[in-house]
Amino acid sequence: MFVPVVDKNQKPLMPTTPSRAKRWIKSGKATPFWNHGVFCVRLNVEPSDRKTQDVVIGVDPGSKKEGFTVKSSAHTFINIQADAVTWVKDVVKIRRLMRNNRRRRKTPCRQPRPNRAQHKQFVAPSTKARWQWKLRLLVWMRRMYPVTCVVVEDIKAITKKGKRRWNKTFSQLEYGKAWFYQQIKVMGIRLEKRFGFDTKALRDALGLKKSHSKLSSRFDAHCVDSWVLANEQTGGHIAPDNTEMLLISPLRLHRRQLHMLEPATGGIRQRYGGTRSLGFKRGSLVKNKKYGVAYVGGYRDVKGCPGTRLTLHDPHSGERVCRATRPESCQFLTFNSWITS
């Protein structure tokens, strides 16, 4: 593993070895910090050289899990396997159901607004959320590494003759990836696209196999494809030199709703959702004297003191470690939007 390096202005430089980073920290030349689960160092002095190599990000999109690799011609800096965002479609369906039910009630309500997306290129919320998640990861990696190129395995929509709604012109998949490619170009990074059969040919040329267990946490499940895509641009290896992976899963933050779907005891609907809890943004990493480093999951009602306690969760597994703790006992560390392991 290599340690990402940034200068005093947060500009990424070439990563360094852990031993050299340790010497920098000990001598005061650098300050350590964590960037969403990745250990980094920030130089306190002017670097001896600002020359950088070509650093490429390989992206293997997937429906459930995805692979990312950051690589140069000399080293593979990091491999990431990320869980995809898969819950937006069901959430939008429930939101539409709740709105329709409210409008059918015999209570004063506003008239529905006109369709503001009528003359715009519409991307379904579930599709856009998937590609926004990929873009967030690219932006995050770009802050740590001097990225010059992104190689993406280009996926195609299913086309069936005689069924117009399945044609690629009307596919949300095509709209989503076109939006994603446009955002990469806006970032000023060179974009390269490869088809699935190109990726397979690259694997076969290097004698690499891909696992059929798509949901497993193995290098040959998804990261092998992202690695060969990056290696095609940088060269330098005939076999993976680093197969360690960082597993990332996005936190599901429930946005504010008017109330729960089902009434509670007494016919009173409980409040539900929100992104802030007792002064903390949900997902934020905090330090508690008893439970150590954890992230804020929400607030909890305590008998006699409604809504005055926080729930804490493990930052690696997501399991709840504390049902109710006082907010004053938690020290804020940093904002967070995913869990790593």
Image: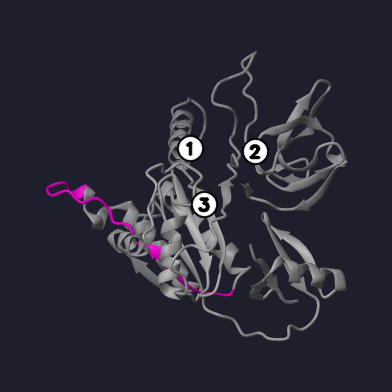
Residue 38 visible at all: yes
Q: Which residue is mark 3?
A: 81
Q: Amino acid at mark 1?
A: Val
CB under 8 Å between discs 1 and 2: no
Label 2 element class: loop
Q: Nearer the viewer, residue 306 or 174?
A: 174
Q: Amino acid at mark 3?
A: Gln
Q: Where is residue 137? Give x, y as percent.
A: 55, 59
Q: Earlier in the sequence, mark 2 or mark 3?
A: 3
Q: Which residue is mark 1?
A: 91
Q: Where is residue 139? Give x, y as percent.
A: 56, 65
Label 3 element class: strand
Q: Is residue 140 left or right of residue 222?
A: right
Magenta region, residue range: 146-165
**Looking at the figure, which quarter contains the N terminus?**
bottom right
Q: Amino acid at mark 2?
A: Gly
Is 272 included in the stretch rendered in magenta? Answer: no
Q: Nearer the viewer, mark 2 or mark 3?
A: 3
State which quadrant residue 90 falls in.
top left
Residue visible at 38% across and 57% down?
A: 208
Q: Which mark is residue 318?
A: 2
Q: Earlier in the sequence, mark 1 or mark 2?
A: 1
